[in-house]
Image: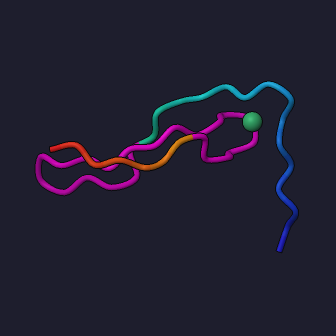
Amino acid sequence: MDIPVECFDHIPILRVLESVGTCETTALFCTECNKQLSESKTEC
Ligand SMILES: [Zn+2]
């Protein structure tokens, strides 16, 4: 398993993890190192 490399200054983007009907599960990820920056949350 690769050791995750975190960048110095994260660039967050909101990414849709799952979309079921009108419900979307989203979380913030860094565009550079791909680290998840926030808890995933589901909005309906
Ligand atoms: Zn980063």
In the rendered image of this protein, does residue 41 appear above or below residue 12? Answer: below
In the rendered image of this protein, does residue 21 appear above or below residue 37? Answer: below
Q: Position of residue 20 (x, y in %)?
A: 19, 57
The quarter of the picture where residue 31 lies is top right
Residue plotted at (40% across, 52% down): 17
Please state if 36 lies on the left or on the right of 40 as rendered.
right
Residue plotted at (86% across, 49% down): 5
In the rendered image of this protein, does residue 32 appear above or below residue 40? Answer: above
Front one among 22 and 42: 42
State the colouring used for the structure image. rainbow
- Which residue in the rendered view is the most extreme toward the bottom? 1
Front one among 19 and 26: 26
Please state if 6 lies on the left or on the right of 43 as rendered.
right
Q: Is residue 26 magenta?
A: yes
- Which residue in the rendered view is the most extreme toward the front? 39
Q: Position of residue 6 (x, y in %)?
A: 83, 43
Residue plotted at (32% across, 50% down): 25
Quadrant field for ligand 1: top right
**From which residue to which does the magenta span run?**
16-37
Please state if 6 lies on the left or on the right of 39 as rendered.
right
Q: Position of residue 29 (x, y in %)?
A: 58, 40
- Count the numbered circles shown: 0
Residue plotted at (12% across, 46% down): 22
Q: Quadrant of the N terminus?
A: bottom right
Q: Quadrant of the C terminus?
A: top left
Q: Is residue 17 magenta?
A: yes
Please state if 13 lies on the left or on the right of 32 as rendered.
left
The quarter of the picture where residue 3 lies is bottom right
Q: Position of residue 37 (x, y in %)?
A: 60, 40
